[in-house]
Image (cartoon, helix red, strand yellow):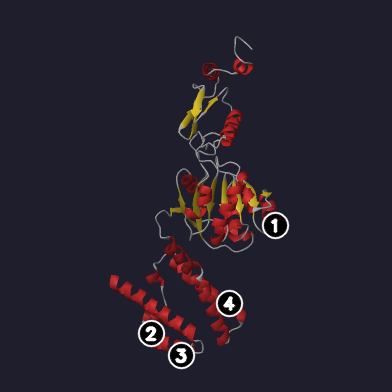
Amino acid sequence: MAGGRSASQAHRRSPEACARSLKSTSTRKSLRMDGCSIRPRIGSWDAGRSTICIRTFPVRCLRAVEARLRRQDIRLSARYIGSDRLDPWDRDGTMQKPTIAIIGPGRAGSALGRALRKAGYTIAAVGGRNPDNVRNLAEELGAKACQTPATTIDLADLTILAVPDDVILPLATEMVDSLCSAAGKAAVHLSGAQDRAALRPLARQGSLRTGVFHPLQTFRRGPEAAQNVADSYFGIDADPPLRDQLMQMARDLHGHPFDLGGIDLALYHAAAVFAANYPTTLLAEAITLAVEAGLPAETARQGMTTLLAGAVNNLRNLAPADAITGPASRGDQGTIERHLEALKRDPELQRLYRLLADRTKLLSANKEAAA
């Protein structure tokens, strides 16, 4: 006992004593919490039934405060915990580069990982279902290989889910169970067909931010795929400041960011499929027809691929209506009928040809009407 007080009371510092201690510190930051604020000139703050006395302001003490609050099930949304990662801007006004974790070492995940590392980003972790693919990409990028996909989220500021569309929501649910702290974390997926709702289990975790980072690009396997990243367009949907970080990340990749907010994603993604997938399907049919006509297989493949590349190259500087060529655009109905006769051995392909010819005629008609 000391002066009628218990030993615990004698050693407990008053708010005034805490305030005097804080006043002498050189640090002058404030920690934003849900409805509360810790400032150097304030010696204590109230959170529900708890009053926490702040003795010093170094980061190690803030981490202790965060741990105590988490035990009391009080959500902490701090601006400064260990680093300034929650705020995308450095104090000199420049954008920071968050550390990256990649879940899914497939085509898109591998290409982005390589491109991000080349752009100066630190790849902290790689996760996925295939341990060999995870290990190989992690070794290449100097990252930690995670045994389970969900455990990657605690190892980086920004986790990228490069997984199939129907895996995003179940994986996000699984990641919640592995999450130690939401403070300073963000997670995005690469799908152009899903919105941020696919990450809603993670979005419910306090200050964790979620978003969409869709590369409007196709990627092949292998290290060369990273070359496709530059000059690509990236659809982005996120709230600030994550949106600002993702926009900057796209620019760091020498890409062109654009806003996906308010876009009809089903229609947008269908458009992307028309542009990126179906030309390849049509090219495969063209090669098959050329071989059936008598061309050697390699000549047919190279010749038709070069023809398609020339058509795409014309589209870089011309509108589709100005770039289109062929009998349908010229109104050469006799040639079209001969093509249809040659295709009668495959009724489905014949119908497809007729439909595309009609669409091409419509494109040409619209051009003439606008002239």
Closer to the chain start, of discs 2 and 1, is: 1
Cβ–Cβ under 8 Å for marks 3 and 1 = no
* Residue beneath disc 4: 301
Identify the secondary structure beneath mark 3. Answer: helix
Closer to the chain start, of discs 2 and 4, is: 4
Q: Amino acid at mark 3?
A: Glu
Q: Amino acid at mark 2?
A: Asp
Q: Residue 79: where, in percent of width, then height?
A: 51, 35
* Residue beneath disc 2: 332
Q: Residue at x 56, y 25 (%)?
A: 57
**In the image, which is nearer the foreground, mark 4 or mark 1?**
1
The one of 147 and 299 positioned closer to us in this rendering: 147
Identify the secondary structure beneath mark 2. Answer: loop
* Residue beneath disc 3: 341
Closer to the chain start, of discs 3 and 2, is: 2
Q: Is residue 115 visible?
A: no
Q: Residue at x 54, y 16 (%)?
A: 17
Closer to the chain start, of discs 3 and 4, is: 4
Q: Amino acid at mark 1?
A: Pro
- Mark-to-mark CA distance, 3 and 1: 53 Å
The one of 366 and 137 positioned closer to us in this rendering: 137
* Residue beneath disc 1: 131
Identify the secondary structure beneath mark 1. Answer: helix
**Is 133 positioned to the left or the right of 241 in the image?**
right
Number of residues whose C-alpha sits closer than 10 Å to that of mark 1, classed few (under 14), some (14–19) or many (20 or more): some
The one of 65 and 335 positioned closer to us in this rendering: 65
Closer to the chain start, of discs 4 and 1, is: 1
